[in-house]
Image (spheres, rainbow, N blue to C red):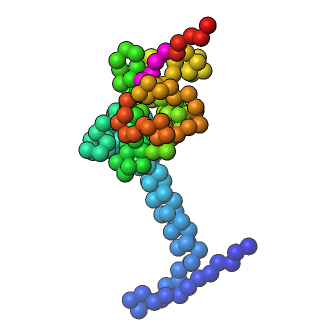
Amino acid sequence: MMEEQSRDTCVGGVETSVKVEEVEEEKLTEMAALDAEEEDEEALPHSEILDIFEEGLARLVQDPLLCDLPIQVTLEEVNSQIALEYGQAMTVRVLKADGEIMPIVVVQNATVLDLKKAIRRFMELKQQREGGVKHVSWRYVWRTYQLVFQGEKLEDDKMRIKDYGIRNRDEVTFMKRLRKK
C-alpha cells in the first residue's frame, strides 16, 4: 500500500500540511476533464467531416492549376494534374466513334497497356459521377475495339506509346475492329 506523504509548507508565515496524494489526484481530475472537453470538441459526425472535406476540396480545385478537374475529384486525378504541370505526364486525347474526346493522362513512358488502364479508369469515374452503367466487360471492349494512331494500330500492349510516335496532346482513335473471316 502507498503511504501517505505530507509536506509542510509555509504560506504567509503560517505553516500548513498538504497531502501530496490529494494534489496529484486533483491534477488528474482536472486533466481528465480537459481531455473530455477536447474529445467533445473533436467528435464530429461523419457527414460533417465529409462536408468540411468537400468544401476544402472545392476551394483547392479553384486553383488555376487544378481548375480543369471536377468537383468530386479523386486523389489520383489531382496527382495526375500535378504530374502534367511538372512534365512528368502527358495528355492523350482519345476520340470515340460518337465524336466525344476523352482527355487521358498517362506518365511519359507509358505503355499501350497503361493507356488502356487509364481509359478504363476514366470511364469508370465518368460512369460513377453520371450514374451510368454499373459494369463494363473490358475484356469484350478490347476484343471488339482497338486504339489507332495515324493509321497504325496500337496492338502490342508492352510497347511504349512514345515508340508509336504519340506525344502530349496527340489524338488516338478508339475504333471498332474489323472482323477477320
Residue depicted at 46% across the width and 18% down the height: 175
User: Would you identify the image quadrant in which residue 169 lies?
Assistant: top left
Secondary structure mainly formed by the magenta segment: strand
Q: Which residues are magenta?
A: 172-176
Work out whether residue 137 can be spotted: no
| Coordinates of residue 124 in the picture (x, y in percent) | 48, 26
Considering the image in quadrants, where does the N terminus appear? bottom right
User: Would you identify the image quadrant in which residue 58 lies?
Assistant: top left
- Compared to residue 123, the image places residue 163 above or below, namely below
Residue depicted at 40% across the width and 20% down the height: 96
Q: Which of these two is toward me, 6 or 122? A: 122
| Coordinates of residue 130 in the picture (x, y in percent) | 40, 20
Please give left or right for residue 55 compared with residue 176 in the image.
left
Q: Which of these two is toward me, 7 or 118? A: 118
Q: Which of these two is toward me, 175 or 14? A: 175
- Compared to residue 35, the image places residue 71 above or below, namely above
Residue depicted at 42% across the width and 37% down the height: 166
Work out whether residue 17 can be spotted: yes
| Coordinates of residue 97 in the picture (x, y in percent) | 40, 16
Considering the image in quadrants, where does the C terminus appear? top right
Residue depicted at 51% across the width and 68% down the height: 27
Q: Residue furthest top?
A: 181
Q: Which of these two is toward me, 160 or 151? A: 151
Please give left or right for residue 26 compared with residue 92 in the image.
right
Residue 165 sits inside the magenta stretch = no
Q: How many marks?
A: 0
Q: Residue furthest bottom?
A: 13
| Coordinates of residue 98 in the picture (x, y in percent) | 37, 14
Q: Residue furthest right?
A: 1
